[in-house]
Image: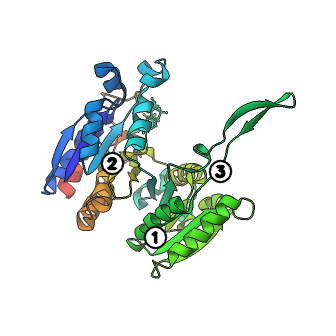
């Protein structure tokens, strides 16, 4: 298992170090090599996604990323911004499937702004297509027509693009509770009528998965009304952008949310959903659990090692049940710990 490790900026190196300790404790055949991405890469080489990193990322089976960015690079020219590195690696590795689980651990039910009974035990997975849709469609732009400015973007999906993301979603549902909800706007948008047609065709390959469909406006409502009705949701780039953020906030704790972005061969980039948290960088207090859970996703989706993934997830549950809390999820009466101590607790639970 060749892993390219990109600690990145801010709290990135602190949280990635803990995820690596956890991976190494599992006694797997791991090879890890570190490289630069983001602001640290700009400082060292002038580029946010330097050639050496590109080469390593290309050769690896999976990439583990901390986070990139920070105020010191905010006024850089566009090509030398840390976020460019992130977009660069996603594009370079052709990562078209973004997987974001939203799990609410019973112990953290109070962190959500929704009523505990609505969200306790929540465990959903949002799958967003990442390389197509209105974000990339042509024509696009702003032009003057008949004396006024007109803005245009184009929603476009080919059936092969829809089929490949649908297959990822069906396969993921098969590994979970076997339910897939496809989200579209077929009552208004032809592009998403095609989306629905192709998802229905693809369902024939996955007869054991129960498929349903929902219009995106209803899906946005249902996510806050009764989110536990969902297992896996799949949708296009724009709807997924919005729904995945909505779903992640159901849990209320940004330091707990992992993510995966996959290519056609299940090679993946794994990273926490949060950013580089410059406000707490270097203080040793960041929550490493989102990154540790991202490592679990790596074992599940790239390396097909479900038992090892479950071991990590169970260890995290146990640590929370034992009352360990970093500052972002702390409640009175719990044991407040720093980044490394949280790593120690997960190792002990393993
Ligand atoms: P952020 O997610 O970094 O931080 C938001 C708030 O959440 C901060 O108060 C931070 O301290 C807290 N937080 C985040 N992760 C935490 C953790 N693991 N433990 C404890 N607290 C945590 O978002 P931001 O402040 O908007 O962005 C900061 C920088 O990160 C910016 O430069 C931004 O561009 C970048 N960013 C990078 C990514 C990425 O690398 N994928 C994603 C989002 C933002």
Instruction: Using the rendered view, name the quadrant where residue 106 is placed.
Output: bottom left
Quadrant of ligand 1: it is top left
Instruction: Using the rendered view, name the quadrant where residue 58 is placed.
Output: top left
Res 170 label:
1
**Label 3 secondary element:** loop
Tell me: residue 16, above or below residue 40.
below
**Label 2 secondary element:** helix
Q: Within 10 Å of the Cα at label 1, are there few (<14), some (14-19), or many (20+) other Cα atoms?
A: many
Res 225 label:
none
Image location of residue 256, percent across then percent down? 39, 49
The residue lying toward the viewer, choosing from 229 and 86, is 86
The residue lying toward the viewer, choosing from 312 and 30, is 30
User: Answer yes or no: do the residues labelled 3 and 1 have beta carbons within 8 Å?
Assistant: no
Respond yes or no on whether mark 2 lies under 8 Å from ligand 1: yes
Residue that numbered label 3 is attached to: 155
Give the position of the N terminus as an image quadrant. Answer: bottom left
Question: Mark 3 or 1 closer to N-term?
Answer: 3
- Alpha carbon separation for disc pair 3 and 2: 36 Å
Question: Residue most toward the bottom?
Answer: 207
Res 289 label:
2
Image location of residue 186, percent across then percent down? 69, 64
**Label 1 secondary element:** helix
Tell me: residue 275, above or below residue 235.
above
């Amino acid at each position: 298992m060749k892993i390219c490790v990109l600690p990145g900026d801010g709290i990135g190196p602190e949280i990635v170090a803990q995820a690596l300790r956890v991976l190494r404790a599992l006694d797997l055949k791991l090879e890890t090599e570190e490289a630069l991405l983001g602001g640290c890469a700009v400082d060292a080489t002038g580029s946010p996604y330097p050639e050496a990193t590109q080469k390593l990322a290309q050769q690896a089976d999976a990439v583990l990323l901390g986070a990139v960015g920070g105020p010191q690079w905010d006024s850089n020219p566009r090509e030398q911004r840390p976020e460019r590195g992130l977009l660069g690696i996603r594009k370079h590795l052709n990562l078209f499937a973004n997987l974001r689980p939203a799990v609410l651990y019973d112990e953290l039910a109070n962190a959500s702004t929704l009523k505990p009974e609505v969200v306790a035990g929540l465990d959903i997975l949002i799958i967003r297509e990442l390389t197509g849709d209105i974000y990339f469609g042509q024509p696009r732009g702003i032009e003057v027509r008949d004396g006024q400015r007109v803005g245009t973007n184009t929603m476009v999906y080919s059936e092969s693009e829809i089929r490949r993301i649908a297959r990822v979603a069906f396969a993921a549902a098969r590994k979970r509770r076997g339910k897939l909800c496809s989200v579209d706007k077929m009552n208004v948008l032809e592009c998403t009528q095609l989306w629905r047609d192709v998802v229905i065709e693809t369902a024939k390959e996955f007869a054991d998965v129960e498929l349903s469909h929902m219009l995106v406006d209803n899906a946005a409502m249902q996510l806050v009304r009764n989110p536990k009705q969902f297992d896996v949701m799949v949708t296009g780039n724009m709807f997924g952008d919005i729904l995945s953020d909505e779903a992640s906030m159901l849990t209320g704790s940004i330091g707990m949310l992992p993510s995966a972005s996959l290519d056609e061969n299940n090679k993946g980039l794994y990273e926490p959903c949060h950013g580089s948290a410059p406000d707490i960088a270097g203080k040793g207090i960041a929550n490493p659990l989102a990154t540790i859970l991202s490592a679990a996703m790596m074992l599940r989706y790239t390396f097909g090692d479900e038992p090892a993934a479950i071991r990590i997830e169970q260890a995290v549950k146990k640590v929370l049940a034992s009352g360990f809390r970093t500052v972002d999820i702390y409640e009175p009466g719990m044991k407040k710990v720093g980044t490394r101590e949280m790593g120690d607790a997960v190792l002990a639970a393993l």
